[in-house]
Amino acid sequence: MIRVVRILLWFFVFLAPWENVIVIPGLGTAAKIWGLAVGVVGLLAVLAKGRLRFHPFLLAGLLFVAWGWTSVFWSIEAELSVGRMLTYTGLWLMAWLIYHYGTVSFPSSLLQAYVLGAWVAALLTIQAYVKGITVVYQRFAAEGFDPNDLCIYLNLGIPFAAYLGFRARSALARLFCLFYIPVALVAILLTASRTGALGSAVALLFVLYHLRAVKMKWRLAGIFLLMGAAWATLTWVPQASLARTSTILAGVRGGSLNERLNIWAAGLQVFATHPVLGVGAGTFSQAVEPILKEPRAPHNAFLAIAVEEGFVGLFLWLSLITLPFLKVLKFSPHERWLWLVTLAILLISFVSLNFEWRKVTWLMLAFAAACSTRDILNPYLASREIV
């Protein structure tokens, strides 16, 4: 039974990076439906086994979910709050199952599943470019994805691919992981996402950190891969996409950055009037509508949680995203930097996007928690000389 659950979890993680591509009308994404099946089977297995594994971050998550459900009673839109809390409840259950069924080797297997799924998302983005299918002008993404959101999924795969690739047992597995890096970079630039470009810069820090420790032949191979990515970027990526990516600083200086500062100012006004309890989970857009004259997404996870669930919810959320990473400072250098870079990419998504309720966020927290109970991801990977 446990083996079945682990296989189901592996496929769930594989589906996560391209979850929006397959949508079943009336039911939702394939990843959502698969996740429900995993949850049912996983719970049955736990009940049959009669033993639980727990982590402090899961306790913080459980309190966060409980507080969110409580906010339904004073929510300005109770129906929206119920929908959001059903999502949070499912995400917490998924995170708990990943932690509960984590073994010495299982977390690294899930990282491999994530990289494989990220390959699919990157190739589908490139396919959209080849077919000329844009999300908006000169911005490309896999079907069903917002370009900014997709970049976070792809960026998170880069440090995992580097970590696994430089320690892979076979040359084929090594190349499969390492070739993901230039392919992902091209796909990210095709989205013309400024958030994605910033996340890529952070992700590449881990790749460069690894290159300094590998043997010369693989250092040269890594440099050639990055040069290949640069050549592909200059050859294939539209100039309009590159031009938009390069306007990060200009957008900040202009004080607009897609009008997000105006949205954040409205959110702070709402927070000032409901600082403790918030306005109800999942209702940020409705709360700022009277100020902005239209519902707007928060584009900031911290502000969204503060407005929707008040100081209490924000404290629980900060605990939730901090606890899985506390032990990484005691890891060996490569494992430590793997998780610190992963956390940095998540923070970029929290500052500019709405990733507090995304599967990938809770996946990363669960991965970090599962690995934090072992000093290493996998005894073979950790003890193996970097190639």
Image: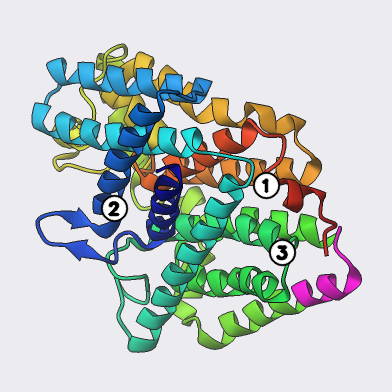
Q: Is residue 69 left or right of residue 241?
A: left
Determine the image quadrant of residue 373: top right
Q: Which element type, helix, strand or loop, lies under badge 2?
A: helix
- Mark 1 vs mark 2, foreground winner is 2
* 361 vs 208, nearest the viewer: 361
Residue 11 seen in the current view? yes
Q: Which element type, helix, strand or loop, lies under badge 3?
A: loop
Q: What amino acid type should be assigned to the residue bearing mark 3?
A: Ala
Mark 3 lies on residue: 168
Q: Tell me if residue 221 is in the magenta stretch.
A: yes
Task: Tell me the distance, in whole angstroms, between the alpha carbons under discs 1 and 2.
Answer: 28 Å
Mark with earlier residue (2, 3): 2
Q: Give the magenta-colored segment's residue range.
A: 213-223
In the image, residue 228 sits, relative to residue 38, either above or below, namely below
The residue depicted at 61 percent of the width and 50 percent of the height is 108
The disc label shown at residue 34, or none: 2
Can you give x and y, in whole percent of width and height, for residue 340 in the image? 65, 41
* 227 vs 144, nearest the viewer: 144
Badge 1: residue crowd in 10 Å (few <14, some 14–19, many ≥20):
many
